[in-house]
Amino acid sequence: MNTIFIVLPILTILMFELGIELDIKEFKSFLNRPKPVIIGLIGQLILLPIIAIFLGQAFHLEPLFFIGLVLIACSPGGSSSNIFSMLAKGDVALSVTLTTLSSIITLFTIPLVMNIALQFIDYNALDIHLPIGKLFLQNIVLMLLPILLGFIFKTKAKQTIVEKVQKILKKCSFPALLLLITIFYIQHHKIILEQIGTLGICILALILLAISTGFLLSTIFKLNSKEKRTIVIEVGMQNAAQGIAIASSPFIFNNDIIAIPSIIYSLLMNIVLLTYISRFSIFNKNK
């Protein structure tokens, strides 16, 4: 089974759900306090890709894994981060704002960062090329357009219908992502198990450094506790579906091996962040 036919609709659904969650009033409110948004975007879009390039070089990753590591590092957000922010008693409005902005900004930053990353390896020997125009077009179709459609649906449809659709999407999106990961693992389990040592440690280091970066930025710039929790989650949580879509797409890299870091990142990321939010979870009666 070609995973691209699973990941593309999943990514579209996740972005459509994000469009439904978008609240223009809350979005505009951050014009009066832009600091947490700017800090989050710096962590997501600038610092994390730099950290990934450094780690990829330090761990001497194989070229395809190096590309995949940088790819997941420059694919921030995803609607799941909004749920994690809610469970951590964070600033959900800030989370939605950051996820929306980063999803739009990465239309331009992913081609730029990936082009820089390719300079660190001999990509011509791998027959790997980055069709920037196709990457830009695919991201518009799979990211920007579903967000716009979700927002239009929210504003035009009846509130009861919007709430029903939103509940269905929330219930279906995560199991669908788990299905994708399961199928991908079954198809490539030999390579994943062979590389899980060095690659897994490298990816775990990336996650921990991402979380630490979010925490340090929030502390240095004196954000409140809710904002700090959200920044930690937003910088630490990457959009695995987007990484897999770009890696596996026949229009971009067309290489499932490049998607493996996104799969491993998704698995480890959920474990680490679930451990983190358990301190603040709305289900923790002692907090």
Image: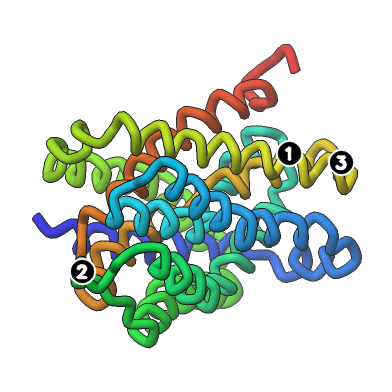
Residue 212 versus residue 19 in the image, above or below? above
Where in the figure is residue 262, as x and y percent of width and height?
Answer: 36, 49
Amino acid type assigned to the residue bearing label 3 in the image = Asn
Count of picture labels: 3
Q: Quadrant of the N terminus?
A: bottom left
SS at circle 1: helix
7 lies left or right of 132: left
Q: Say which amino acid is labelled 1.
A: Phe
Mark 2 or mark 3, whichever is nearer to me: 2
Answer with mark 2 or mark 3, whichever residue precedes in sequence. 2
Residue carrying label 3 = 224
Figure check: 132 above or below 236: below
Which labelled disc corresponds to residue 277? none
User: Residue drawn at (69%, 48%), measured in percent from left and top?
Assistant: 92
Instruction: Name the residue at 20% across, 66% down.
Output: 126
**Image: 32 above or below 205:** below
**Mark found first going from the N terminus, 2 or 1:** 2
Residue reaching furthest to the top: 286
For marks 2 and 3, give the CA distance.
49 Å
Report whether residue 227 is seen.
no
Contact between marks 2 and 1 (CB within 8 A): the answer is no
Camera-nearest residue between 60 and 160: 60
Q: How is the image coloured?
A: rainbow
215 horizontally vs 66: left or right: right
> Label 2 sits on what residue type?
Ala
Along the line of sight, the residue nearer the viewer: 1 or 284: 1
- The first of marks 1 and 3 along the sequence is 1
- At x 25%, y 36%, the residue is 195
Residue highlighted by disc 2 = 125
